Amino acid sequence: RPFIPRLFLFSNIQSSLEIELNKSSNTDAGTIIISYLVMFLYASLALGKFSSLDPRRVVIDSKFSLGVSGILIVVASVSTSVGIFSFTGRKITLIIAEVIPFLVLAVGVDNIFILCHEFERRKQDGPVDETIEKRAAKTLASMGPSILMSALCETIAFGLGGIVTMPAVSSFALVAAVAVFVDFILQVTCFVACLVLDAHRAEDERLDCFPCVQISAPETIEREGLLQRWIRKYYGPFILNRTIKICICLVFLGMFMIGLSLAPQLELGLDQRIALPSDSYLVQYFNDLDAYFQVGPPVYFVVTDTNTTARTDQQKICGRFSTCHDHSLANILEQERKRPNVSFIAEPTSGWLDDFLHWLSPDVGCCRFKKQNLLVPPSKKREMCGPFDDDDDCEPCTSSWNITMAGLPEGREFLDLLDLWLAMEPDEDCPLAGKAAYGNALVIDRANTTIAASHFRTFHAPLRSQRDFIAAFHSAHRIAREISAEWGIQVFPYSVFYVFFEQYSYIVFMALQILALAVAAIFGVTAAMLGSVRTALIIVLMVIMILVDVLGAMTMWHVSLNAVSLVNLVICVGISVEFCCHIARGFVVGVGDRDTRSFKRLADQRAFDSLVYVGSSVSNMFVLFLHFLFGSYKCRSWLVSPSLLFPLPPSGVLRYHAHQICRHHCAGVHAIKDF
């Protein structure tokens, strides 16, 4: 029995990629829901402060219902933002549903932790007879400005992502910006009210989630939180050691320099295989396409604003007649074909004008009229000879045909014969007939006796990488510009993939523009709300260092720059500010015990208190953010946070920022891989 090899067949149509992406997203729904639930559970439990292991005390001190209210505020924020943009007619994409809840929760839970922990701290430090409402008011007065500052910075930074011209990415950025701002509004209003109600519940010794049930429980023993205690006893003193500060600053300065050297090498593009499931048939299709296919996508050079029925314009386009210009469109494309490593054009050009005019040649014998019909005007129906008609009964359409183009038709006669050519099916006797190859290649303007538009088809060389696709796009546009400049006619190229790669002709400039605007906006907001230009400058400096490190990490991990990663860079700016501004304001205005709170204290002590009282709240959110959004990437920022600028001259503001901002130096670096 003869061996019959198996045949592997992989197909692809224009909608295949979208279908596969939707299928993948539907199968991920369960994973996403589980992630949300676990994330919500963590946030709810982390808000609790258990002073005793007695079950009666635990069910009272639990903050699960308060955490759920905070989570519902996040859901309401996202829903409000989505509803606003749906009402305006902007399409809501799948990435919005999958990513924005995580993003808003990451920045929103930070504020929840800060408010809850400050509220509890004031309970310990405040007067015994202070009412819950008064304590909540002081909490909001203390932490509200920093929450407003971070919300404004993030809203502006995310909103600037809307400048990106890719609709899906632009929608994502704008929805995120509105969701963050709505989340802020609800947190300083609705959540504070929930916080007061929960405090009344705990004071009345009512069960969490079941406030109608009241029990008798042991007295609350006010204790410092475990994380806050660990920072105070171990992490803070360690990180403020002068030697440790110098070492950490040197390490991160080295990282910044490495990132700065790698950033110019950042690649552009977005391989569509990355977005597909590993078991998708399209992955194997694209792999086989790269491995075996020896021709690239077709490319069309579209010509407009030229009167092809006139001899002078015909000579600007044709290539197979002796009087065609040396730098005609067909000749330029033929010369470019001979250097495919530069032009990325690998096949001869299919030019309708040359094929049509050669179809008229008497030697070819395709265009012949029966002699009895020679007196009929060209505008009337004329019976053409078939391939089996006797030559004595037929007459060539253009008996004066010449390789010099003398005697070839022009004007109305040109269009009449062109109609006959486009209506004829090619066969073995007349392969130059135009219906199959050029039936849809021309737009005829009969009113003005001209060709309004037409295209000339060729093929790219095999394109096996994003760099090849981008280079082919730029090369085709270069060729079109040269032809347009040579003859003053309008020429532009088109291929099926150009719509996805046009962004790379301006994305670098756009990235610099958007990031610069985001950084400038952050500087303006922080300088105005902190009242310190130097503090704002240091925050901006740290954000820039984070961005440079992220770009360097993208280069090392082969994460390319595209519209999606550009928005993620803008998000990185917003998240960096979220990690920085709370501790920054805590340092500037002073936090800590009432008997030690003074602007005249040493900068190290002010930074230490800011880290203990504010940093512990931010760290809770930071662990949540990394664990659920960025998976396996753990940040080493706790080893570098408080010390970046401490070796500099002893300015309190300057020293502090080592402390606060560098701690999140790794956040963007490790996060961009998963983005």
Image: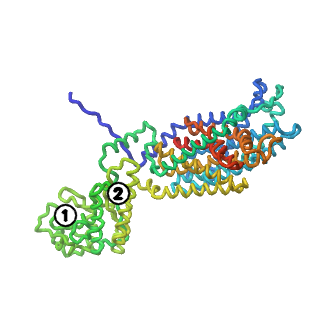
**Residue at 42% from the left image edge and 38% from the top image edge:** 280
Percent position of residue 534, x then y: 68, 54
Q: Amino acid at mark 2?
A: Val
Give the x, y percent position of residue 85. Answer: 61, 53
**Label 2 neighbour load within 10 Å: few <14, some 14-19, many 20+:** many
Badge 1 marks a residue whose secondary structure is: loop
Q: Position of residue 439 (x, y in %)?
A: 31, 61
- Amino acid carrying label 1: it is Cys
Disc marking residue 299: 2
In the rendered structure, the answer to whether residue 41 lies left or right of residue 21 reads right
* Residue 82 can be seen, yes or no: no
In the rendered image, the vertical position of residue 182 relative to residue 197, given as above or below: below
Q: Quadrant of residue 495?
A: bottom left
Residue at which label 1 appears:
366
Coloring scheme used: rainbow
Alpha-carbon distance for marks 1 and 2? 29 Å
Of all residues shown, which one is farthest toward the top? 54
Would you place residue 646 above or below residue 459 in this image?
Answer: above
Looking at the image, residue 418 sits to the left or right of residue 625; the answer is left
Q: Can residue 204 be seen here? A: yes
Secondary structure of the residue carrying numbered label 2: strand
In this rendering, which labeled residue sits more in front, label 1 or label 2?
A: 2
Q: Is residue 14 left or right of residue 165?
A: left
